Amino acid sequence: MLEVRNLTKVYGALTAVDGVSFVARPGEILGYLGPNGSGKTTTVGMVTGLLKPTSGEVLFEGKDIQEDLRAYKLRLGYVPEEPALYPYLTGREYLELVARLRHISEGRLGEKIPRLLELLSLPDSFATIAAYSKGMKQKVLVAAAILHNPDVLILDEPFSGLDVESAMVLREVITDLARDGKTILFSSHLLEVVEKVCARVLILSKGRVVAEDTVERLCELQKQPKLERVFSELTAQTDPVTTANKILTVVKSGG
Amino acid sequence: MMSRALGARVASQLRAEPRQLGLLTHVFLRRITDSELVSQQGELSVTFSHVLAFIALPGMLAPLLVMPKYSYLATLPDWIREPYTWDDKLLFVSLSMTLIGLLTLFHWDELLLDGRDFSTLAALPIRLRTMLGAKIVMLLSFPAVFLVAISNVSSILYPVMAMPPGSGLGVYGLTIASHLCAVFAGGAFVFSAILAVQGVIATLCGNETVRLVVPLLQFALFLLMLSFFTLAPRMLAGIHPGDDRLGTAMGLFPPLWCLGLYETMIGGGTAPVFGILAGRALGALSLSVATVCLIYLYAYLYKFRTIGEARRAEAGTRLRPPKVAVWLFESLLARTPFDRAIILFVGKTIRRSHIHRLILIGFISVGFMIAFEGLMALLAQTGGPRDGQRTPLLAMQLILTFFVLVGLRMVYAIPAELRANWVFQSAVTEEPRACQTGVRKAMFYCGACPILILLFPAYVVQWGWSEAVFHLGVGFACSCLLIDALLMGFTKIPFACAYLPGRARMTVRWPFYWLAFTAYGYGMASIEAWIMEGSAVRFVSAAAIMLAAIAALRILSVRSVRNHALLYDEEPEPYLCTLELNRVE
């Protein structure tokens, strides 16, 4: 079980995350939602151990991850929001690098990586990542995150740039991994996918948790038919239609 | 009505193009000044002016260094004095050629219109000819700016010394013009020749061939550029005006062509061969410029329009290493997955990351030139090298490994795609001590081993098997010592930590670095020669001392990273260091 207790991150005068608490249970996919700048990626950074919290703690199986970050990292899989990869490596070389850093033996990586490349329709050629499309880079990130069969999977916008078929495959993979008892934190802006995949969702606004429950219960409480409307009601600071009209006025002004 | 609208569109396009041209030229020039070596916090313009100042320094100092000689030469008649000025003129020309050549090599990737330009600019309403025009303006500005920096002081000061005593303003003006023409022609020739070679390869070869050929070509060009500077001073030793050597073998040395141009323009005329050399200078310059123009024209007509497609179409089968090599690597050289990850990451980054490769090539080339100089000095002795003089030959291996290992340590600190280092931050679970083992092995296998193995056959031919094997052993042991010394306190994954320039404090510590190089390169070679000439007791005691030194340094190196975390973000040193007397423990 992954438990976040009163997590806070302060950058100078800015409080990016303010007292966030939640629990993600094994076998459960927890949706982590919020508008841009709400503190999602900062939380994800702290949950992965890449960022140190200003206060609060992240517990995995009851132990603070900072106490034994090494053991936690061995069981963690992470897809970051930005597809930052080494552009001069090929997809295969990148996956081999990650596999070796995660202590996977040559025999196992020799079996796993070609299969994963084939199943994800990634080229096993000398073409480097620099020549990959955004979707292909995303597939490399997803493959790197699940390569070692992690117990905790933290996905920050994993569907970004993926084509319809690959997105459907990834959705199935995530659901099946949860069924196998993995703990999954799923951060995304694609609310339809979140609605279908996540057992519970947590909505963040200005660094604070503003709602946490099942999708059905949130819709019921907010008296809205869809998660999108619930999200908008809880987080929107301006009326989207009015803002859209204002943007169009600026665009059309002065030729 | 339609024709009026069309006319208005064309007129608007024509008005827009010069502005776009200016903006794009600025962008392309800015990319040249922007590099991975510049700190994120560094002010770009300030850093660029530092680079310009650094480039200008040799050109400023050279006239001052040669000045005493001219006070003596002023008393001699013209026909005697003139040949004594050649080597200085050659020095200025070769300096400009070397510096411009090295700068061009460092900006190898930015000089052609590449896929990055295409993908950024293709969506905007910019004509291909405007992009190309901006690139050409940038290509003209690039050497011009640096050539002005290199020659501004020397072109004013040196002609005062070089012109015949009592000459008027006209002669002074002519000497300045000749100086500038020769220096600019040398720089322009090197610049356009490198561009032409690069363009021919990029145009005629496939991506995989380019990837294989370019590192070797860059190494060869680096050596060539350095040889211009190092060979120039001795090129004219003992040469008199009517010497045949000026027109034959030595006439293949490009800086001499520009000296010919210098002398012909100035109206020296004492050696008719200078006219031939000047012709060669102008011919070579025209040929290289024409080649560049043809390549750009061809690329404009056929290649640039499909450049985006070429990037996508890149594919092919992966080359697999032989099974024996894989077994050797996995079972003996790097037995843990982590070590394998680090060694392969280091090897691939050096092979494929342009800036890292070039810096390392620079170090190897300097080492090569120093070793070559030693060898030449040995061979130049009357009657060839004597039996007792082994030190310069022994030092070759040590000098080369020194420069490779120091170069590797330097490039380790320079990040490659810093944003991608999250993968190490999230996946590396090793302690810095274990990381250092992987990094040490990477340095040994990627740096020391190739040099030692490549030189081994030469030593076998020179001294036979037993002494060559002994020398190889010394090479390995010394490399181990140096690697441990270089990795003292190194708590990073290579290429994965932010870089702060100036941490090596070259301006203050250079005597120490020079001493370390001399002790390692020549000191160790002298000790080795002493052991080789002695008895078995001498060998055994030296081996014991060496092993003890390796063990001691290893312990110190491991201790230096104990209780430290792996570093991914280098903190700048504080502007003010306090004594912390008020600190409570």
Image (cartoon, coloured by chain):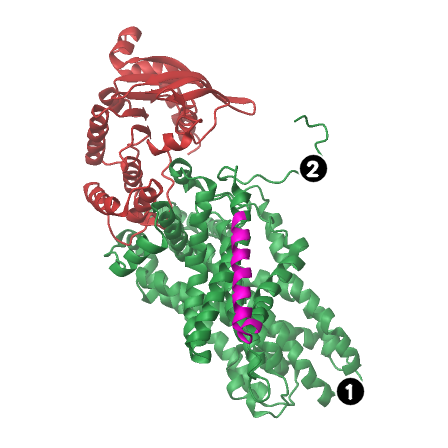
Chain colours: A red, B green
In the image, which residues are magenta? B530-555
Task: Read off the chain for label 1.
Answer: B
Can the viewer see residue B109 in this picture? no
> Which amino acid, by three-letter code, is at mark 2?
Leu
Position of residue B64 measured from the top left corner of the image (x, y, whole percent): 74, 69
Magenta stretch contains residue B540: yes
What is the magenta segment's predominant secondary structure?
Answer: helix
The foreground one among B525 and B49 is: B525
The foreground one among A79 and A148 is: A148
Q: Which mark is residue A64?
A: none
Residue furthest front in the image: B537
Relative to B472, say whether A210 is above or below.
Answer: above
Report which residue position mark 1 lands on: B76
The foreground one among A59 and A153 is: A59
> Which amino acid, by three-letter code, is at mark 1?
Leu
Report which residue position mark 2 lands on: B576
Q: Residue at x 71, y 70 (%)?
A: B63
Magenta stretch contains residue B229: no
